[in-house]
Image (cartoon, helix red, strand yellow):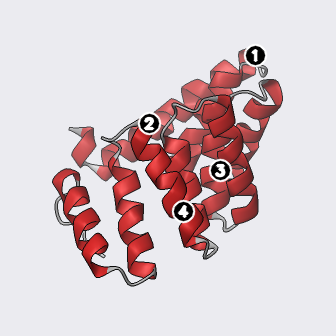
């Protein structure tokens, strides 16, 4: 299955990009297609193209929390942390129940050394969805950053239930 084969995943995304380009060619104001196209480029690590399409999706619909969250991810991976923090907050305001945005915000705050803020938003995300393992994973990194070994062990163990082999 493709879930376990990175090369198949890449091939599927490339095919998806071709179809999404056709959809966008029919209607460039189809915001969800713009965002889906941006996400496909993101998965292929093509951040410039991902940024362009996610930004276009947000221009079409400024309340598109998925596009805001996806663009925040692009900004995180391109080390534009301030923009990523702002967009993650915007995504949370647009749809507070969308847990991915809390994870993005937490890891951005960790990247800029604001560990207390990271922990705060990660716990808010856990309150929204206690099964979202990414929050626990980033919490492990947060507690490592502040030297809290007991909490590191706790959150590594929780993460390992979903991601066997995970370690810091």
Q: Which x, y percent locates residue 103? A: 49, 51
Please give the residue where the numbered disc 4 appears in the rendered image: 118
Q: Earlier in the sequence, mark 2 or mark 3?
A: 3
Name the residue at 32% across, 43% down: 8
Name the residue at 60% across, 33% down: 66
* Image position of 62 (left or right of 64): right
Q: Residues within 10 Å of mark 3 (few under 14, many from 20)?
A: many
Q: Quadrant of residue 110?
A: bottom right
Residue 72 - label: 3
* SS state under label 2: helix
> CA gap, disc 2 to disc 3?
19 Å
> CA gap, disc 3 to disc 1?
25 Å
Farthest bottom residue in view:
147
* Image position of 31 (left or right of 42): right
User: Where is the N terminus found, in terms of image quarters?
Assistant: top left
Q: Residues within 10 Å of mark 2 (few under 14, many from 20)?
A: some
Q: Is residue 52 above or below residue 161?
A: above
Please give the residue where the numbered disc 2 appears in the rendered image: 128
Q: Nearer the viewer, residue 63 or 154?
A: 154
Q: Is residue 31 above or below residue 124?
A: above
The answer to whether residue 44 of the structure is visible from this angle is no
Please give the residue where the numbered disc 1 appears in the rendered image: 27
């Amino acid at each position: 299955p493709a879930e376990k084969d990175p090369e198949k995943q890449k091939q599927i995304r490339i095919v998806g990009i071709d179809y999404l380009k056709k959809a966008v060619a029919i209607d460039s104001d189809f915001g969800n297609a713009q965002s889906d196209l941006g996400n496909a480029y993101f998965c292929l690590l093509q951040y410039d193209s991902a940024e362009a399409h996610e930004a276009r999706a947000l221009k079409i619909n400024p309340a598109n929390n998925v596009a805001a969250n996806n663009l925040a991810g692009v900004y995180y991976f391109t080390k534009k942390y301030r923009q990523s923090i702002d967009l993650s907050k915007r995504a949370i305001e647009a749809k507070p129940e969308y847990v991915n945005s809390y994870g993005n915000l937490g890891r951005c705050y960790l990247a800029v050394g604001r560990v207390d803020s990271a922990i705060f938003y990660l716990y808010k995300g856990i309150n929204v969805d206690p099964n979202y393992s990414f929050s626990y994973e980033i919490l492990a990194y947060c507690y490592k950053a502040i030297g809290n070994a007991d909490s590191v062990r706790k959150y590594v163990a929780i993460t390992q239930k979903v991601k066997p082999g995970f370690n810091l």
